[in-house]
Image: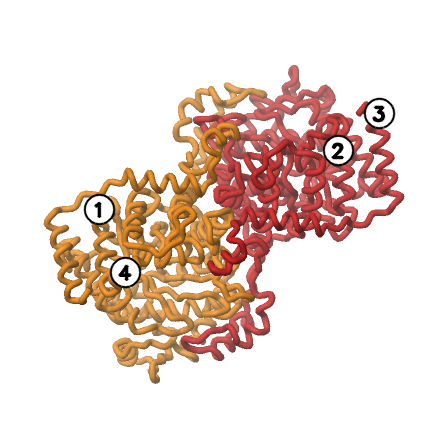
Chain colours: A orange, B red
Amino acid sequence: MFRNAMPHYEILSEDALETLDRGWRRIVSEIGVEFLSPRALELFRQAGQKVEDDCVRFDPDFILEQVAKAPRSFDVQARNPARSVHIGDDAMVFGGVYGPPFVREGDVRRDASMADFRNFTKLAQSFDALDSAGGVICEPEDAPLDSRHLDMTYALQTLTDKIYMGNVVSGENARDTIAMSEILFGGRAAIEATPATISLINCNSPLRWDDRMLDAQFEYSAANQAVVITPFLLMGAMSPVSIPASLAQQIAEALTGITLSQLIRPGCPVIFGSFLSNIDMQSGSPCFGTPESAIGLLCTGQIARRFGLPVRSGGGMTSSQMPDAQAGYEGLMTMLPTFLAGINWVMHSAGWLEGGLVASYEKFVIDVQVLEMLQHEFTPLEIDEASLAFEAHDEVRHGGHFLGAAHTMERFRTCFYRPFLSSSQNYDRWLRGGGSDAAARAGEIARRTLDEYEQPPLDDAVRAELEEYVTRRRRELGD
Amino acid sequence: MFRNAMPHYEILSEDALETLDRGWRRIVSEIGVEFLSPRALELFRQAGQKVEDDCVRFDPDFILEQVAKAPRSFDVQARNPARSVHIGDDAMVFGGVYGPPFVREGDVRRDASMADFRNFTKLAQSFDALDSAGGVICEPEDAPLDSRHLDMTYALQTLTDKIYMGNVVSGENARDTIAMSEILFGGRAAIEATPATISLINCNSPLRWDDRMLDAQFEYSAANQAVVITPFLLMGAMSPVSIPASLAQQIAEALTGITLSQLIRPGCPVIFGSFLSNIDMQSGSPCFGTPESAIGLLCTGQIARRFGLPVRSGGGMTSSQMPDAQAGYEGLMTMLPTFLAGINWVMHSAGWLEGGLVASYEKFVIDVQVLEMLQHEFTPLEIDEASLAFEAHDEVRHGGHFLGAAHTMERFRTCFYRPFLSSSQNYDRWLRGGGSDAAARAGEIARRTLDEYEQPPLDDAVRAELEEYVTRRRRELGD
């Protein structure tokens, strides 16, 4: 797990923060937020909030009281304790892409399969820059719909020893995820003591929380499992075309969702989520890696810290259909601000392509390369007398070179980050080596990594119990 | 010209700055700096510095006294006054790539020609994000060596109405640039009043200033033309493998070069230059877009501001041989920190490929796309009551969309930056449109832009005088 001890890049003034504060307060109190869940509405009613049909009008100070019950930071355990993570403070935790129905491998774009899901899980296990394969890395269209959450969870639990995300399609799926986590971690008490899953609860923005996701949220929060409460904002469609208006809406949605979790189980772990970009106003297409999304991201980090909450945002987003130059610059247009903003939980860190419709093998490797570079870049520079290396200057003096200097000899193995994908070969050497571009080389690295993948060990009895659970539940679900 | 009113991202503590301060003071006083120019040595001797052979050992406080004579900021005039620029403060001024002997266009990589030089000049004229074509955009190998500076300067003066850079191959070339600028701007007094050129004076790092560049520096500074005093540091080769040691060397080299300019003509315009990256310690190849170069860049902005000097650094650097994903992420790995660091004069902003050996048509367009995005991103967000757009939330309320909201209708044309290269088309539409990647689309845009290029008007008498000068001087130079 990476710790980002560099300064935060904060662009909102105190005045701006106060204006946004007035914005969300007015939204939650005057317009209110819909919760399509009788259980949720009942909790809010009992807590003294104004409930009318499905709409809850909030006292903003009540929201802040509930938000204050959430932990500022917390741990999520992995079955390999060395892979456990901290969420919050200066920790940055990275998970793979989430949700694409399609896969791209070289020139082929096709429906995602369970084999792809397993492949991406193995890739995530193989790269240290990633803390998690994520959750629904791709939608395995060849697995039965009602029981594929079991297959995905089993793959995440057995093919990696890193943390994983919970399924959120329904309360029932959430219960399955929790039950399988109990098996893996040795019982309910073990996962209640330290959460073993993070689950993504998306808002049906604007200002509506849907029943199925809320059912999942009830299960996870009751079990003290972490939830990422995420407004889903493509400005122009799900939020206004003004960034400040969208930020106010984002706060309103995130904080009301978090309030629900704190009513379900006070003190349960939550993350202030953000998924904020914009549409193209001519075509209506979602756009990623945009200047507007980067600005929103920088603001979001600052806003979440103000509420004392861990924050999710960022990733390697791009609209590009190919792992090309656009994918390169758009991905970094989001990922570099992710570091600047001090984001704690970063979904879509690797593999995202074509607006999130495609999980790409090549882009996965490209993203890991970028992640490694940024993790080096955001490691504070030590500047002291020794690092000035006066003796090196004194040795080389004027017009020479430092290649053979003693200072160089001592440090040349580790002094600079050495990329595994980027090429700095001279032209002739590069041509002789095949003259392939970064995407082609990334594809080769993906294939080699899968060939060399080794499954992390798992106790046979635990594996058998998980398999038994999957088999039984699949039968019950009629698949 | 872009003004970057966003906060600077500063990562050096006061302690770190003081350590670096001790570093450069010790280098200039104990090791000294070589100036391979009797004129320069004589100036330093007269000013009371210790001169022994070609080496000058400085009193650091003397250096600071001279540096204090340099202007904190200054203007550079273009022949179209609307294209004149400010160097320093929050201004960011962008010029094209500088120096490549090769050109890449699609799959073809070849020697650069004068036709390429003119093409890149036209491209730079065509994109508003660029303030200058630069100087030696590529080395036109088909133009006679001794007089090609005349052809390049004439092209820059006539094909664009933006600012341009001066030739620095020799004092004679500098005198030609100045003479041609006098013709274009109406005499010596006009260009002495407001500089008309910026010229790149590179150090032969470590700690040596060569005669030919110094000869050019003498001409430009005496004529009150701006010079960019630039240590040329590829860490591991021209400077130590430790970033702090390289930063101390960079300060020592930049400030001693600037001191020379201030002795030549007190108060003449100078820029604290930085060209700082690292080599691959296994192959010795220069690497660009590296984490180390980004860290160095952030530090450099902060350091130059401490000395009250405008600063040059950054660009769209990459080691990649192709305009691929690597070129995309490496270019932005340098260009985004360029904005964060508040760099004032940005060379290599468009077209840089393959470690600077290649000027690429496709990369030029990709870089302009990235520049436009960053110029939008680094425009401060206005957050006030109106931008909260409460009426939009009140109109759309729960679970709807904002596509047709009044707030959207009012602003949809200008609310988001609309890229000219990046594609967010859906897959089928993109396929129907040819399914081309960003590099291929960039190539098309370059060709279309050249087709549509219109030469900016120039007074016939001035043009004739320039042509006459070029013809006469070419004859004198024997080409």
Left/right of residue A105 with respect to residue A114 in the rendered view? right
Q: Nearer the viewer, mark 3 or mark 1?
A: 3
- Element type where label 2 sits in the image: helix
Residue type at mark 3 is Glu
Check whether the beta carbons of the residues at disc 4 and disc 3 lie within 8 A of each other: no
* Inter-mark Cα distance, 1 to 2: 64 Å
* Inter-mark Cα distance, 4 to 1: 18 Å
In the rendered image, residue A127, in percent from the top left (x then y), is placed at: 32, 42
Give the number of the disc on residue A226.
4
Check whether the beta carbons of the residues at disc 4 and disc 1 lie within 8 A of each other: no
* Inter-mark Cα distance, 2 to 3: 22 Å
Q: Nearer the viewer, mark 2 or mark 3?
A: 3
Q: Residues within 10 Å of mark 1 (few under 14, many from 20)?
A: few
Q: Chain of mark 4?
A: A
Q: Chain of mark 2?
A: B
Depth check: give the residue in front, B416 or B212.
B416
Residue type at mark 2 is Tyr
In the rendered image, residue B357, in percent from the top left (x then y), is placed at: 59, 33
Check whether the beta carbons of the residues at disc 3 and disc 1 lie within 8 A of each other: no
Say which quadrant the C terminus of chain B sits in. top right
Looking at the picture, do discs 4 and 1 lie on one chain? Answer: yes
Instruction: Name the residue carrying label 2.
Output: B220
Instruction: Name the residue carrying label 3.
Output: B476
